[in-house]
Amino acid sequence: MRQLAALILLIPLLGAFATPSIPTQLYSSLVPTKVLATYNSLPKPIQYPQYTTTTGTWLYFPPDTWTSGFFPATLYALNSRKAVCPPTAANALGLADWVTLGRSASTGLVPLEAGNNQGHDQGFLSFPFAEELEINPSNTTAQNAIKAFSKILAARFNPIVGCTRSWDSADPNDFQVIIDNMMNLDLLLNAADLTGNTTLRTIAMTHADTTIKNHIRDDGSTWHVVEYNSTTGVVIRKRTEQGFADNSTWSRGQAWGIYGFANMYKRTSKVDYLVTARRLAKYFLDNIPADGIVPWDFDAPLIPAPRPADSSAATIASMGLLLLAQVETDPDNAVFYTDSAINITNAITSLAFNEPWQSILSNGTVNKPANNFLTGITYGDYYYIKVGTELVSRGLGGGLC
């Protein structure tokens, strides 16, 4: 009898440590089907999808747009999915040669290597070329792209400030840096590996170190924008551009920070970056509301209801948490971050997996202050695909794909 009682007590504990269920939609045939349809709809001359209308139709933008690298990278991401999920009629991964399509779609980015108007976002433009080098490290087109984009980004570094400039401003002394820029540092590390130029690595780490010092609040939340005096390095102002208020926490910025610092730890092994990624992750997870839906800003008012979500913040954070779990030195933390990523993905799938739309997900918030929300977003779809592939790679979603 005592043994039965002990077993009954143990059952809830075992359930508490069980991996959450993974949403089947991650591996739906709609995912490659929609991506292929978008590829076949790319305008000529080429333009790229950035976000949809509020009824789900993609809007296309010229190559000299900060998001232009995401759709070609999405095609490569489906090749990565195909490598871990054998193509079947059910998953539709055999519909295309995704690498060939990725290479084709990337050609519109090549002219930007000579110069563009995207400031710090050279890293995002380089994404498909980085994906290409994972497949074929000797591809000279991809190598040249990484070198060229990194040169543009490195030229924006100010050693007095200790950061690369994000946005240009009319006042040259106003040196603006946004938390999103953590995602562009990987480009500098990739270029350093290709060229042996250690200065690029130093720039990336200096930027990350300065971000830790000035972008992160005591509670682990982040400011969106920090403005410095370019000649003294002194912080002038901390504010938001896309969040609810200067003292609020814009969820996508927090997600970029989790991902960026986890990646910097992966690439450099500097423990400060792991500690920072943990701090940002804790704030993010502690502030997700009870329904599990990531809001566009953690401090945005609940009324009028419903407070808009941001599906892109959810997928970026999920992928960032999986990366953090991968590099985590504490096994219990690694399990917690993995489970949290799955829970976030479950919640946003329930809300935003939208079969009739051209995008995979709806309920994205591009820029709420500019009234651009309730859309699909290209980078939200990109990270949604990557989350599903990463879970399979870890042996967690293989039966679904």
Image: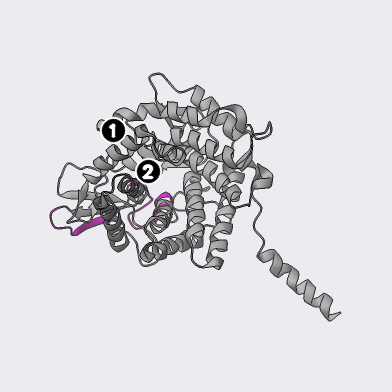
Q: Label 1, on which residue?
A: 113
State the mark number for residue 369: 2
State the mark number for residue 171: none
Foreground: disc 2 or disc 1:
1
Bounds of the magenta segment: 230-254
Secondary structure of residue under mark 2:
helix
Does 253 lie within the magenta span?
A: yes
Q: Residue furthest top?
A: 44
Q: Is residue 304 visible?
A: no
Residue visible at 39% across and 63% down? 276
Which secondary structure is most common in the magenta stretch? loop
Q: Is residue 29 left or right of residue 42?
A: right
- In x, y percent, where is residue 283? 45, 62
Q: Amino acid at mark 2?
A: Pro
- In x, y percent, where is residue 169? 20, 43
Q: Quick check: 47 above or below 24?
A: above
Q: Quick check: 100 above or below 374?
A: above
Q: Is residue 348 left or right of residue 300?
A: right
Between the residue at mark 2 and the residue at mark 1, the CA separation in whole angstroms equals 32 Å
Residue visible at 24% across and 47% down? 165
Secondary structure of residue under mark 1:
helix
First in sequence, mark 2 or 1: give its number.
1
- In x, y percent, where is residue 6? 78, 77
Q: Is residue 2 left or right of residue 49?
A: right
